[in-house]
Amino acid sequence: MRTKAFLAVTAVAFTVSGCGFSGIYDIPLPGGAELGDHPYTVKVQFRDVLDLVPQAGVKVNEVPVGRVESVGLAKDGWNAEVTVRVNGDVKLPANALANIRQSSLLGEKFVELAAPSGGQGSLADGATIPLARTNRNVEVEEILGSLSLLLNGGGVDQLNTITKELNNATEGREPDIKALLNNADELVSSLDQQSGNITKALDGLNRLSATLNAQKDTAVKAIDNLGPGLGVLEQQRGQLVTMLSALNNLSGVATETINKSKEDLVADLKALLPTLQKLGEAGSNLPKALELLLTFPFADSAYDAVKGDYFNLYAKVDLNLNEILQNLGRSRQNPLDGILPVPGLTGGVQGVPANQPPPLPIPGLFGGSQQAPTGGTGASPQQTGPGGIFNLLSGGI
């Protein structure tokens, strides 16, 4: 009896518990994310969820923060809607992004939540992440399928032909190709070093273009005015050709003349070398000489002597009595010749003409041994004017 009662209770318990069991997805996976005491639910819309299943992980920065509760259709009936539960301690902006990724090449799928660069607000319980902020990674199957299309129906045969042609073109020319690559490397390095100058040149071209654009009307007028000028040149083409031919002949004659006179010209230049050197040495004196040349015949120092209608004469005379007496003794001329007679000076002496010295020698005047002139008209010829005084002072020279 007791055995029947136990079996009945057990059957009732399994029946009651079976009412809340919806399958193996209700069993939490071991090692899953810790949801905490206050998790919040978020709905994420995807165009394609691939093979994402409930109980898959939810990660933020590769850290598990929740799990997928369910995968179903959105209200529009075309897109998928994934319900996820996230740990309440994880804070995300209201405009968070969602992406379906794969843990490894053959690993499981999971939902990755991320904050955008300009995060705003806070992701709350019951929020929805729309299609505009969701995406998925490319599957390995898709990559392999595209690769198979390329290999089977793509341009692999053309690539094979191109490779063979390149091998044929470069065979035996390896040093030239290496040198070409080295030159290209040097060219690129030089261009990189001159990037500043290139930028300046481009800026200059930009300014030139702007200037030309601003003066477009002037340039158009100048181009329009070139037509008549070209017409005149066309009319005078024969004369221009004749002139150029004459210039050609002249250049030939000039070249021949220069070649023949080259030695003489070089000799003349060498002969001018000492003169030019002296001119160089006297370079500082030339300006002063030119100043005197401009004031000829009167120098600058004579300007102070001329005042109006008269001329001042400045002279420095050094009179030495001893020198004067010696000059009188050496002179053979009468120092009084040419001076007008002064009444009563010597005329009172009998037998002595006017302005003549006495017949007796004056000691020390004629050296003692020389006799004084005897007078008369047969003496030394008389001179007129003041020449006697000047000759006396200069020693009779």
Image (cartoon, grey):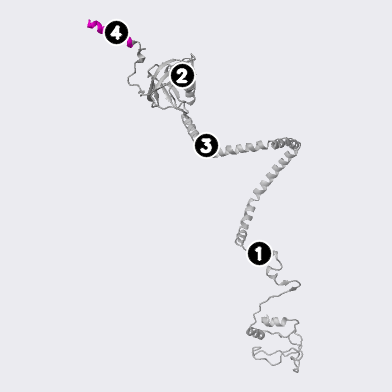
Residue beneath the point at 72% across and 42% down: 246
What secondary structure is found at the residue carrying circle 1? helix
What type is the residue that disc 1 sits on? Ala
How far across and down, in percent of the image, does residue 165 sit?
49, 22
Q: Which residue is mark 1?
A: 289
Say which of marks 3 and 4 sits in front. Answer: 4
Bounds of the magenta segment: 1-17
- Looking at the image, which residue sits at the far bottom? 350
- Asked where in the image residue 286 lies, by quadrant, the reply is bottom right
Ranked by sequence position, the earlier of labels 1 and 4 is 4
Residue 396 marker: none
Residue 191 marker: 3
Q: How many marks?
A: 4
What secondary structure is found at the residue carrying circle 2? strand
Say which of marks 3 and 1 sits in front. Answer: 3
What type is the residue that disc 2 sits on? Gln
What secondary structure is found at the residue carrying circle 4? helix
Residue 45 marker: 2
Q: CA gap, disc 1 to disc 2? A: 106 Å
Ranked by sequence position, the earlier of labels 3 and 1 is 3
- Asked where in the image residue 247 lies, by quadrant, the reply is top right
Mark 3 in CB contact with mark 1 (< 8 angstroms): no
